[in-house]
Image: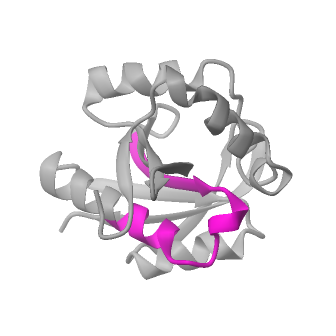
Amino acid sequence: MTERLTLRPLLPDDAEAYLAIRHHPEVAKWVPLPLEGVIGRFAAAWEERRYAPWGVFQGGRLIGHGGLNYVPEFGETEVLWALHPDFWGRGYATEVAQASLDYGFGTLGLGLIFAITLPDNLASQAVMKRIGLTYRKRVDYRGFKDIVWFDKSRD
């Protein structure tokens, strides 16, 4: 929970609304990962690690996802967010990302949290900077080349 948002694990009943957000062309161009069984994968991660992306709700309406996600390719945890375009520009991504850092560093005791995005996604890079992440490098990830990597350590 944040000041303006409700954060909770996604449930099977959220699938239709969630997929509508993820299939929106303005969201899909920035979050091109497969959707098959995503809510089930998130639920399994909650059981295994005590974290996964939350559903992000504003006024009872699902507006996207955000939270923490373990990325085995890097052996680290990322902070991520994806919101319906109707809710862009209101500070919600920053709010959910900051809540995610607080949970990851405070509750879970993680040592490092990173965020990655496509090089031309300047809005996400602005969120990364607002929550205190620092640009570190470029990486390749799941077939995408030259992905921008920001991170922050608990210290």
Quadrant (top left, top right, bottom left, bottom right) of the C terminus: bottom left
Q: How many marks?
A: 0
Q: Is residue 57 visible?
A: yes
Q: Give 14 or 29, whichever is nearer the viewer.
A: 14
In the rendered image of this protein, does residue 11 appear above or below residue 94?
Answer: above
Residue 33 x/y as whole percent = 70, 36
Q: Please report the residue visible at 28 percent of the width from the left and 21 percent of the height from the top.
A: 47
| Picture residue at 44% right of the left edge, 57% below the top | 114
Name of the residue lying farthest toward the right:
25
> Which corner quadrant of the image does residue 54 belong to?
top left
Instruction: From this view, report whether residue 2 is shown above or below residue 47.
Output: below
Residue 79 visible? The answer is: no
- Position of residue 14 in the picture relative to residue 146 (left or right): left
Q: Residue furthest front?
A: 59
Q: Is residue 120 left or right of residue 137?
A: right
Where residue 116 sits, quadrant-wise, is bottom right
Q: Is residue 82 magenta?
A: yes
The N terminus appears in which quarter of the rendering? bottom left
Image point 45% across, 26% down: which residue?
Answer: 11
- Indicate the colouring scheme: one colour
Residue 48 in percent (x, y) is at 29, 21
The residue sitting at 80% across, 48% down in the picture is: 24
Q: Is residue 14 left or right of residue 18?
A: left
Q: Which of 17 and 77 lies nearest the eye of the viewer?
A: 17
Q: Position of residue 12 (x, y in %)?
A: 51, 21
* Residue nearest the viewer, comparing 95 with 125: 95
Q: Please state the extent of the stretch shown in magenta in the rendering.
A: 76-98
Left or right, 50 with reference to 86 = left
Indicate the position of residue 28 as horizontal and vertical percent values: 78, 47
